[in-house]
Image (cartoon, coloured by chain):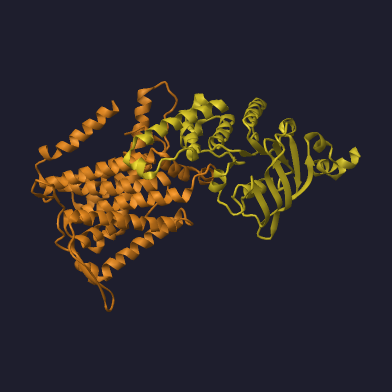
Amino acid sequence: MSGDGKTALSVDRLSIRFGGLTAVESMTFDVREGEVLSLIGPNGAGKTSAFNAITGYLPAASGEIVYRGVRLNGLKPSRIAVLGVVRTFQKTSVFAGRTVLDNILIGLHLQSRQSVLAIILGLPSVAREERRLVEQAREVLNFVGIESHKDKLASSLAYGELRMLEVAVALAARPTLLLLDEPVAGMNSTETMNFMAMLGRIRARGVTILLVEHDMKMVMRISDRVVCLNQGHIIADGPPADIQRHPDVIRAYLGERHARAQG
Amino acid sequence: MRRLAILALLALLLSVPLWVGNFYVLHVLIVTGIFTIAAMSLNLLLGYTGQLSLGHAVFFGIGAYVSALVSLGFAVHLAPDWLVTLDPQPVWLAMLCAVAIAGLCGWAIGRVSFKVRGAYFVIVTISFAEVARLVALNWDELTQGPMALNNIPPLAVSLPGLDEFDFIGKVPNYYLVLVAAILAYVVIARLVHSRAGRAMIALKENEPLASSVGIEVTRYLVLAAVVSAAIAGAAGALYAHYIQIVDPNVFMFLYTVTMVIMVVAGGKGTLAGPIVGGLIFGLLPEVLRSFAIRPEVQWVAYGVLMILIVYLLPNGIVPAVASLWNRAGRADAPAAPTTGSSPGRIVP
């Protein structure tokens, strides 16, 4: 299932420091085109820090981050989004005071081209583009299945719908690599099932997905590969089945004594 | 329905000089109109990008001074033996210069705010206004300092085949300000309902998320600052050629505060908000005066009303009315949006 095997994103010896504290130490992994790669690890393992470094929200202390041949180190988040790398946030993050449709229209920013002068002059091309954007926004909402809520304020959505909206905003930016930071945290099982179905539809469109998630059932079911981090280091990298049996992973999650008891 | 309401409002505004014979009332309306334009410009920055410019009077003052100086001409030593002179220019050209230079100052402020947001942006803008006031006060050779620039010519337009028309007196100036206000409204309305306006709103609502979908946040912050400053500069230019005298007091903090009150009370982040706020707080002092209350009582009443509005309608008058309207319109529908930032599309 893992695409054509070509490397999309490569993270090479990435280190991230906060003052004297090292959050990520010499992390190396690749994401291949079209695959779903999950990054797992106990809390504080450095998963979200790695996400932030890849998407330009945190500076890398050392190491290289390259997406489709372009070095991402030092680029602004907006520039990285232009290259097709778009993320969601761990803490639910939408434009809460706007309607669902407005949220998607904001997400479609890169799909619009009209200049400020054309906008102020009110040229017909501006109105044409607006109509096209609304059409695209509806398609996106339809795709994630929240079109019926399009005129509601984002802040009035139920939690599961809110997280769907979050992904919809990211999808509106037309990612080729989508990074999802704990997207199903706090969802009930129905919502999680819906979300997984949607992830399937996203990958069917050829979007590569990098996932940080604690819900192991989900990780094991949808990932092509899993990378396990502990205390800033990669301790395992492989298909889900191998990861589940990997002694270091079991030790990281369940502790030394459990590993001995099993052993 | 909405179109009809707008037409009716326009007809009402256009007909004002026909049924208001009192020149003093017209004068109050003109000045109110000028400050309403300034409030509209502040709203673009405060209401849509969420950045509070507490030195907004600086753009108004720069517009007034530039327009006055270009139309009067000046001779100023930039170095002991480097004299720069400018002959008096037509007023329309002076006004364009005012808009351009105010916009340029907006750009500079916007660039500075590349790094600073929130409270720091407020401090930068206050400082900028104070520096501008001190320059106007002390650079006698250019600005006449506290002596003020006097005898500023009124706007004169000459159309081919017609005699020159001077905007002297209340009625022509009323229409001039009305047209300028409509222009400013249209520019701001088009901007906020476009991709640029959405980018500004996104910056206010959630900056990290905005940049994650590719919005160059700084670019749109600078754009808002430039357009906002240019419109405030135009309001300042209108003021200079109407009042025909400009002194360093145009940079006073009080003017900025007046604009902020108009925007916040009317409803920031709504197109109609600064207009409603501008009309109420521009006309209120005069209305109170007409009741012949003592001045102290007047100002106390003004203050009490302001506190009441902020206390009872924290999002401003327009969003409150809009949500009432929505609730009345569809009683069975779920609660209407009440946040200050949302009703931009609901109200005209």
The outermost residue toward the bottom is: B80
Instruction: Describe residue A203's horizontal placement relative to residue B71 as left or right.
Output: right
x 34%, y 37%: residue = A123
- Image colour for chain A is yellow
Measuring from the top left, give residue B279's x and y in whole percent: 25, 43
| Position of A46 relative to A135 (above/below) | below
Closer-to-camera residue (B242/B260): B242
Measuring from the top left, give residue B105's x and y in whole percent: 35, 58
Question: Which quadrant does the C terminus of chain A fall into?
Answer: top right
Closer-to-camera residue (B259/A179): A179
Instruction: Describe residue B196's horizontal placement relative to residue A214 as left or right.
Output: left
Instruction: Describe residue B2's horizontal placement relative to residue B144 as left or right.
Output: right
Which of the 4 image quadrants contains residue B77?
bottom left
- Image colour for chain B is orange
The outermost residue toward the right is: A263
Measuring from the top left, give residue B197's x and y in whole percent: 41, 42
| Position of A159 relative to B115 (above/below) | above
